[in-house]
Image (cartoon, rainbow, N blue to C red):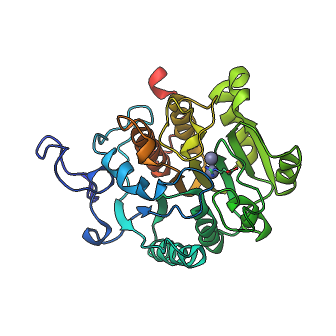
Amino acid sequence: MTNFQGPVDATKVPRYGGPATFARLPRIDEVARADVAVIGVPFDSGVSYRPGARFGPGHIRASSKLLRPYNPVQDIEPFALQQVADAGDIACNPFDILEAVQQIDLGVREVLSAGAKPLTIGGDHTIALPLLRVMHEAHGPIAVVHFDAHLDTWDTYFGAPITHGTPFRRASEEGLIDQTGSLHVGIRGSLYSREDLTDDQVLGFQVIGAHQFDDHGWRGAVERIKARVGDRPTYVSLDIDVLDPAFAPGTGTPEAGGLTSRELLQMLRAFAELNLVGADIVEVAPAYDHAEVTGIAAAHAAYELVSAMAPRTDGSSTDGVRADG
Ligand SMILES: N=C(N)NCCCC(=O)O
Ligand SMILES: [Zn+2]
Ligand SMILES: [Zn+2]
């Protein structure tokens, strides 16, 4: 028996009906407290190319209806081991980035101070800056595992310092990230210049490029991530464009040669061994999606992250291959 309120039972209420919350979970006002809060941030005024990630939260929720209670690879019921609830969307100003950043800061702060780990569904990558500010306030410098095709450590766009291409430079400058424990995973595509990489290194990031998956696979990436992050408080920022456009067409700045959804999910499963304090999933732009491909990938990534955050009372952990034997 569990005290936690899980999803609406899909054997009683068909899953195409029922609540529009993430995974048909309760709203946060329907539970006494939450361990993990799924927060929507419908903001995309920081994009440099295709807009539309403001519709990401609704799309990911809609694509999460098929999630079931038992996660066989992590061998847990993530919604029975902890209270997971949907905290709704943060209302943020689409015409004023600074005000939006402030609104996101306040909204996430509220959830965190009530004792919940935030799992934010965006929104463009700009939102990582206020999220990291709040995480830093709670935990000190944060080890960031950043999945992305892009470095997002550029300086400015058209003179604007706060955009979806700049959050990790600002976060590093502000001392929010642990510069000895952070890395980007899945980086690929053309850059502005060679200095992009040297700047990035100075800002405190290591890089696991998408091309390295051919030689070392997701297991090699997990080994490097674990070695770098250790038991530091760790934040996962997941830009869905880390996936190949074949697996995530619905995004604003797609780049060829990305990861498969299977590789991504395997890595996230292995994060049960990390000290996860929060996560975001950003850059889902449904106007470019087909057949919910991107939404489903994002929803499944969220499910693995929620599972990885679950307390393991038996002291067990997973290396992400449990169901392989
Ligand atoms: N954060 C994302 N998805 N993209 C950043 C791309 C920045 C650029 O236009 O060069
Ligand atoms: Zn990004
Ligand atoms: Zn990106």
Q: Residue at the left extreme?
A: 12
* Quarter-of-image position of residue 2: bottom left
Q: Is residue 199 above or below residue 224?
A: below
| Residue 36 in view, yes or no | no
Answer with left or right where residue 131 lies relative to residue 144.
left
Please state if 211 lies on the left or on the right of 239 as rendered. Answer: right
Q: Quadrant of residue 65?
A: top left
Tell me if residue 60 comes above or below residue 117 in the rendering.
above
- 53 or 2: nearer the eye? 53
Lateral position of residue 158 relative to residue 27, left or right: right
The tally of labels here is 0
Q: Residue at 60% across / 51% down in the picture?
A: 49
Q: Position of residue 62 (x, y in %)?
A: 31, 48
Q: Is residue 128 visible to the viewer in this orientation of the structure?
A: yes
- Determine whether 91 is above or below 56 in the image: below
Estimate the x, y position of residue 110 in percent, counting from the top left: 46, 77
Pick the front one: 86 or 199: 199
Residue 224, picture quadrant: top right
| Residue shown at the point (73%, 21%) measured from the top left | 215
Nearer to us in this view, 91 or 237: 91
Percent of width and height locating residue 201:
85, 50
Q: How far across and down, in percent of the image, does residue 276 sit?
A: 57, 54
